[in-house]
Image (cartoon, coloured by chain):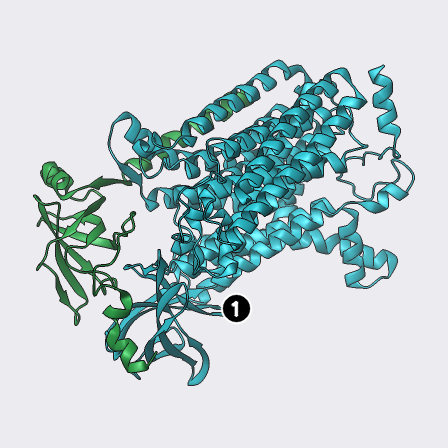
Chain colours: A green, B cyan
Amino acid sequence: MIAVIALAVCLGAIVWIARGSMGDNLVYYWSPADLEAQGERAFGTPVRLGGQIEPGSIDWRPETQDLYFVVTDGGAKVKVHSKGTPPQMFSEAQGVVVEGTIDAGGVFESTNLMVKHGNEYRAPAPGEEPQQVYRSLVQEDGP
Amino acid sequence: MNGPIGAGAVHAALACAAFGAVCGFVGGRRRSMDAWRLARGATYASFAAMSLAILTMVRALLTHDFSVWYVSRVGSLETPPFYTVISLWSSLEGSILLWGWILTVYAAALAFVYRRRHADYMPYTLGVLLSVSAFFTWLIAGPADPFEPVFPVPSNGPGPNPLLQNHPLMALHPPMLYAGYVGMAVPFAIASGALLRGRIGTAWLRPLRLWALIPWTFLTVGIVAGGWWSYEVLGWGGYWAWDPVENASFLPWLSATAFIHSLMVQERRGILKTWSLSLLMVTFLLTILGTFMTRSGVFNSVHSFSQSSIGPIFLAFLGVALFWCAGLLATRSELIASDGALPGPASREGAFLLNNVVFLAFTLTVLLGTVYPLLAEAIRGVRVSVGLPYFNRMGVPLGLAVLSLMGVGPALPWGRSDAARIRAQLLWPGLFGIAVACGCVAFGVVQPLPLLTFGLAGFVTFVTLREFWVPTRSRMSSSGAGALESLFHVVSRARRRYGGYVVHLGVVAMIVAITASWNYKLKVEATLDRGGSFRIGDYDVTFRDVRPVEESHRFSVVATLDVARDGEPVAVLQPRSNHYKIMGQFQREPIGTPAVHSTAAGDVYLTLLAFEKDGSQATIQGLWQPLVPWIWWSAGLMVLGSFVAMWPERRRRGRARGGVDGEAHAPRAEPAPPPGQAGAAAAEAAR
């Protein structure tokens, strides 16, 4: 009986610790509008932010490896900064998911940048086929 | 024709499993040999029918029979035959089919192996196993029917998920994982059978242990192969991300490991019985929960769960299983009362119990982190995920506790012991561990956690090797035999214990490799012109060119890089970026394949991030991943250890019954009755 109580206490303690350390590490799935609605409370909270890249907002500085762009859900806009080369398919109006936190300056510091792969298959528009996109590569090095 | 044949076979298997289950229960209850024979026959028939079903599916896939629903979902004319065959488990219905088939393989194996032995409770066991089997076969026959006819018949299909046709490890990882997952039903059924039978001695503990070790080994291989696949395919340079699907496979592994340890105490001391059985039941429930979590789409969103017909069914099955387990433990509690008490914390038994608590705490932690997002969305309507830091913060101390116990446990004697003896046992290993830590400092390791890990690893290795060395040396001096021969003799006399130690060494190697690869990884990202190079660790990486390659099922952009060490070329690596063909057209988003140069010290790991469309430039990410290959190798050591532990002990059978038991620590071997005797006894009991 004592063993059972001791065990229950042990496991209860584990749950307590786990719950506590989970609190700091919850990542919220927010859209730019959700982020805006949170206001100052959002500062420093780990967030997974999903939306579209605003056309014309991509600013890539290869010499410092800094990448700036704006994520939008149509209404709200969030400026994102990320470090490192953007993925191959990173382009305007593409869906993206960025993980990170928003700082007091209102810039979202991304630690992880993912181009959203569409769940549904979408046929490539004319000229979008990879062979055509990379035609120069194909032509130069032969078939 | 494939559709009707497959569906017919599944229905036949369902009928056989259901009939066999009834026969099993009747045979167990009435002690009827006829019913037991019928149950075994039904098991074989069910296995044969499921084999026919799965072969039919393979044939349908290979012949691109798009009139079969599953083939129309995952097949395509362009996919190479190898990936066509393994696309059998690339989607829900196919993997449930594999699940069901593996379960019938286990059931048939069990029926065959114990056709003449353990006949008092085996009918019940088979009854329970066939009930589970009937449930899964019913899923295949109805809610998750892969053989459903498609009309009009499409001319081509989308092919399997591109990620799943990107690496041959996909041929190994899912079947191993399923074999482990499904196999946990077998010890569950053995325990259920023995409890249902009522009068239980200790005879059933041997099959229980064997049939827990088999799926445990498969599960170990499956989990590590999954990490390896992720490392070789996903290109982020890691092998474990605490993803819900990974956690689902890790959870039953943790609780099964706890069970295997507590069972040893039960066998030897007759204590912790209820505890062991609870762990076993928890393991089985976790496999069902894991299958539910990974197969119902619940992790995309709680809301997509309601769209899947299979989710609620699994939840109902989980409820039934939970009720069954609780009921069995409650109503049979007098059978599993302890024969004694724990001798105290500073004993082998105490260490085992502590090990169990740590493993259970680990299980609970991972479970909480895994299901929390589901609960949060269901109850509060917020979508969250539990971040990696949670798992790392909780997992690291628990992992270190496991590591310490692997050293302390084997060093402690069974039963009561005095402090002086314990101190003498722990002195040298402790000193060795400190020496290892000091050596690491000399090599520049200064962070406290890696130092602690490496020091503890030294401590555990010393204790474990001493367990091999001391008896080997005394054997050498008593018999005059050579070292290897003596070692073989010592190990073969106590295979289970030494098998366990080999597994421990594998775990130590794995923990060391994981610690090193986490803390000492190097990362370089560079945009290179042709002929340009960067340096990572001791290696120079030079960009040669980037060119396209077209295959029937994909279009790839391949970068070629020369890897040199001290000016000597050591490898040519080709990281690539693949566009898979779906319905005759190439997908837009590429899937990268990293390229790896593996050495014993670590891996050079290159990923193609971006390239200029004229081929003049490429952006390459280079990682130096210290000791990562040891993770895969140590899994091999763990498998070897389990084989040593599982190897049937033939020599004993030939000797006099209950003859000299070579191993001081092992319980007395159960004498195997000669063929027919058990059957005759059961038949007598039936009268």
Depth order, front residue of B99/B356: B99
Q: Residues within 10 Å of mark 1 (few under 14, many from 20)?
A: few
Residue A1, by quadrant, is top right
Total labels: the figure holds: 1
Q: Is residue B358 above or below residue B160?
A: above
Q: Quarter holding the N terminus of chain B?
A: top right
Q: Secondary structure at mark 1?
A: loop
Pick out the residue farthest to the right: B656
Q: Quarter holding the C terminus of chain B?
A: top right
Pick out the residue farthest to the front: B152
Would residue B565 appear left or right of B307 to someone viewing this image?
A: right
Percent position of residue A15, x then y: 39, 30
Percent position of residue B536, x then y: 36, 73
| Residue at 50%, 37% in the rendered image | B358
Using the image, name the chain to which the residue with label 1 belongs: B
Residue corresponding to mark 1: B600
The kind of residue tagged 1 is Ala
